[in-house]
Image (cartoon, rainbow, N blue to C red):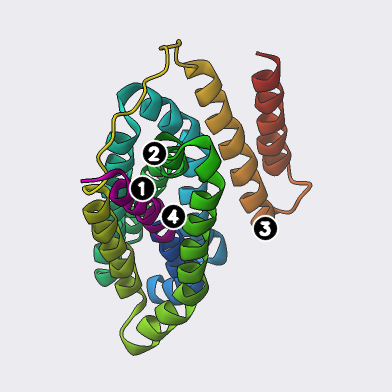
């Protein structure tokens, strides 16, 4: 495979990876009211379907980047896409049988997959393209991804209206499969950086701070902004965040 072909597939792979996540987010945002009604859960409980994934992405994105540096970005990228597609399929199954905990397991797995694949999707272009071509490659990647992102909510809305909300997640799984096929076409030699100690403490503190603040804000919708539980959670998150900065 010549160099230009590898570059072309690298752009398509990176765009497909970002688009898979965008499709997944659209499926959740458009389908959330239908999920709440079908599952018979409260508004606060339904927010976990969205926020659980976002919390895990925020907590594990630095881990995904570090693993890509150590194990190879394409390897970690493919692992992330596999987890994302598998999580979407589990979410689909949980929706079909109307079991909320199964849906949360799927959504958590999706967040972990994005946390692994997202850093590698952009770093992939840095590996493949020389400095002078990176701006153009990133522009093409974003153009493709944003086009798909723009049309995804409409397509997902049609699927939800025509069938049911769980089937929207099959679109995420299908996009993941397409991404893996494209990724198999990208062959290059990654220049591995010098290994540095992994910042375990920083990753743990970041995840804890985000989790505490997010849960606190969600709890405020039910208990009020001034309730002791909300103040404790948000305050604890800010303290952990400050510790992260200091350490």
Q: Counting other residues with Cα less than 10 Å from the Cα at mark 2, is it few (<14), some (14-19), or many (20 or more)? A: many
- When asked about the image quadrant of residue 129, the answer is top left
The local secondary structure at tag 3 comes to helix
Residue pointed to by mark 4: 18
Among numbered discs 3 and 2, the one appearing first in the sequence = 2
Among numbered discs 1 and 3, the one appearing first in the sequence = 1
Magenta residues? 1-19
The answer to whether marks 4 and 1 mark residues whose Cβ atoms lie closer than 8 Å is: no
Among numbered discs 4 and 3, the one appearing first in the sequence = 4
Which residue corresponds to the image point at 53% horizontal and 36% vertical from the top-left?
131
Residue pointed to by mark 1: 7
Which residue corresponds to the image point at 69% horizontal and 35% vertical from the top-left?
232
The answer to whether marks 1 and 2 mark residues whose Cβ atoms lie closer than 8 Å is: yes
Q: Mark 2 or mark 4, which is nearer to you?
A: 2
Distance from label 4 to label 1 (Cα)? Answer: 17 Å
Residue pointed to by mark 3: 221
Q: Position of residue 32 (x, y in %)?
A: 48, 70
**Along the line of sight, the residue nearer the viewer: 96 or 182:** 182
In the picture, measured across the screen, residue 54 lies left or right of residue 92, that is right
- When asked about the image quadrant of residue 170, the answer is bottom left
The local secondary structure at tag 1 comes to helix
Distance from label 3 to label 2 (Cα)? Answer: 46 Å
Residue pointed to by mark 2: 128
Which residue corresponds to the image point at 42% horizontal and 17% vertical from the top-left?
193
The answer to whether marks 1 and 3 mark residues whose Cβ atoms lie closer than 8 Å is: no
């Amino acid at each position: 495979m010549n160099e230009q072909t590898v570059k072309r597939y690298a752009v398509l792979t990176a765009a497909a990876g970002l688009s898979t996540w965008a499709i997944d987010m659209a499926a959740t945002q458009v389908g959330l009211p239908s999920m709440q009604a079908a599952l018979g859960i409260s508004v606060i409980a339904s927010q976990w379907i969205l926020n659980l994934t976002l919390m895990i992405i925020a907590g594990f994105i630095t881990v995904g980047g570090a693993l890509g540096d150590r194990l190879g970005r394409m390897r970690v990228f493919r692992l992330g896409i596999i987890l994302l597609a598998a999580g979407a399929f589990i979410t689909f199954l949980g929706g079909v049988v109307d079991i909320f905990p199964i849906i949360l397991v799927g959504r958590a797995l999706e967040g972990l997959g994005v946390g692994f694949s997202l850093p590698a999707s952009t770093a992939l272009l840095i590996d493949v393209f020389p400095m002078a071509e990176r701006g153009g490659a990133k522009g093409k990647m974003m153009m493709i991804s944003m086009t798909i992102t723009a049309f995804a909510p409409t397509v997902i809305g049609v699927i939800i209206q025509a069938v049911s909300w769980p089937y929207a997640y099959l679109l995420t799984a299908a996009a993941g499969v397409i991404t893996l096929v494209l990724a198999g076409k990208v062959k290059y030699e990654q220049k591995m950086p010098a290994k540095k100690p992994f910042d375990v403490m920083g990753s743990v503190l970041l995840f804890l701070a985000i989790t505490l603040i997010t849960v606190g804000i969600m709890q405020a919708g039910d208990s009020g902004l001034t309730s002791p539980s909300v103040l404790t959670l948000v305050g604890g998150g800010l303290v952990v965040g400050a510790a992260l900065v200091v350490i």
